[in-house]
Image: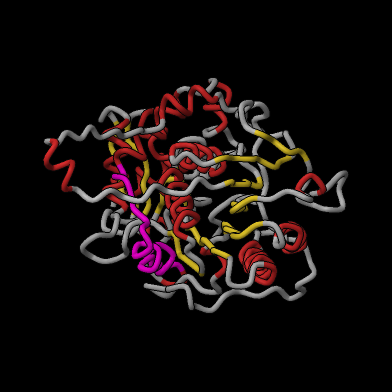
Amino acid sequence: MLCALPKEFPMTVDRRQLLQYTSVTAALLGASSLACQSAPTAAPTPKLRILILGGTGFLGPALVDAARARGHELTLFNRGKTNPGMFPELETLLGDRDPQKGAGISALANRTWDVVFDDSGYYPRHVKASAELLAPSVAHYVYVSSISVYSRNDIEGMDEDATCGTMPDPTSESMGPSYEYYGPLKKLCEEAAESAFAGRATIVRPGYIVGPLDPTDRFTYWPARAARGGEFAVPGAPDDPIQVIDVRDLAEWMVHTAEQKLYGHFNAAGPMPSPESMLRWGDAIAACVKCAGGTATPRWIPLDTLAAHQPAGFHIWAPYEGETRGLHRVSNARAVAAGLKFRPIETTTCDTLAWFQSLPEARRQRLFDSAARMLSPEKEAELIAAVKSA
């Protein structure tokens, strides 16, 4: 199952909208002069020169915000096609991840940075080219991979040492008709980065990344559907586990890994998959209803009804049984120990819905049109009727 799309969406985002709907928390601290004198002074975080390969899609803008909030200096490298002009104040180098297209990555030559964030590498040949070019002049390579690298989804509590998938032909750059090679290609990309940056690479394996600016509409569908009101079909059961990570939490933690020089592999999946702290599917849906104003009613569709009526599918959710039992139960203990934190699902949901509702009507309608949706109104009504008559 894919946890990031391997291509860009034709979506334009107003930078003002992102800033308007991104949650920002500020704490005002007051203390006596005596307390100030006795309190230890934290060492200032060194200012880093950061290169982002991408920077204007989904995770990229969140990385920009997180890094600038910490006072770091940024350079972007991209084709200038996705949301061009989003960051006019930042240095932007134009080129292509494919070194064989146009000027390729030549704009990166003879430059020095402290760390590079690679959130746009899907093919090992591309990652190999950028990593090898930058290795002599950059100290740290942070590559955004995916939990899709693992060969199985039926094992609960999988950690970073779980078996990864392989490609029948490692030289192929096809993801396959059902994207079945997306994960194995990501694994080869990891290896390319680690080969060039031996002992200096951080491999980040997120699960489902959600939040404002998400071009996939996978999580956005649920608060947007709740905002339409009425009964809506929700697969599975309220106690099913769900792992999603807010793009802003991921970005802030990635900046932390750069500041602390944290190397190795990390599953950046959602809240801890334990009975005490896991995020329940029912809690996520409740947050969607609440953020949408409380006028919608979820109608839970059990697995036997889904099997009998065969809907095309649902976003984010997967059956908590069989081959997908472990999909939303991935161990993130290593990342949490390294400082990964999560904001409440209500914050993520409300911010996502507010951003979505700020978009042009045509863009919002795309989520529900026949090409984009997985569940037609007719099939949704059929499922709800089946549950009611059972």
Of the pair 377 and 258, the residue shown nearer to us: 258
Question: Residue 280: x and y, percent?
Answer: 28, 55
The number of numbered discs placed on residues in the rendered structure image is 0
Q: Which residues are magenta?
A: 324-345
Place residue 30 in its image quadrant: top left
Question: Residue 25: x and y, percent?
Answer: 31, 34
Q: Vertically, is 228 above or below 321?
A: above
**Quadrant that contains the N terminus:** bottom right
Can you see residue 84? yes
Question: Residue 329: x and y, percent?
Answer: 37, 66
Of the pair 378 and 154, the residue shown nearer to us: 154
Residue shown at 42%/75% (left/top)?
155
Residue shown at 66%/26% (left/top)?
85
Does the magenta portion include 140? no
Does the magenta portion include 326? yes
Q: Vertically, is 1 above or below 357?
A: below
Residue shown at 49%/44% (left/top)?
218
Instruction: Decide if residue 34 is on the left or right side of residue 206.
Output: left
Instruction: Decide if residue 212 is on the left or right side of residue 85.
Output: left
Can you see residue 175? no
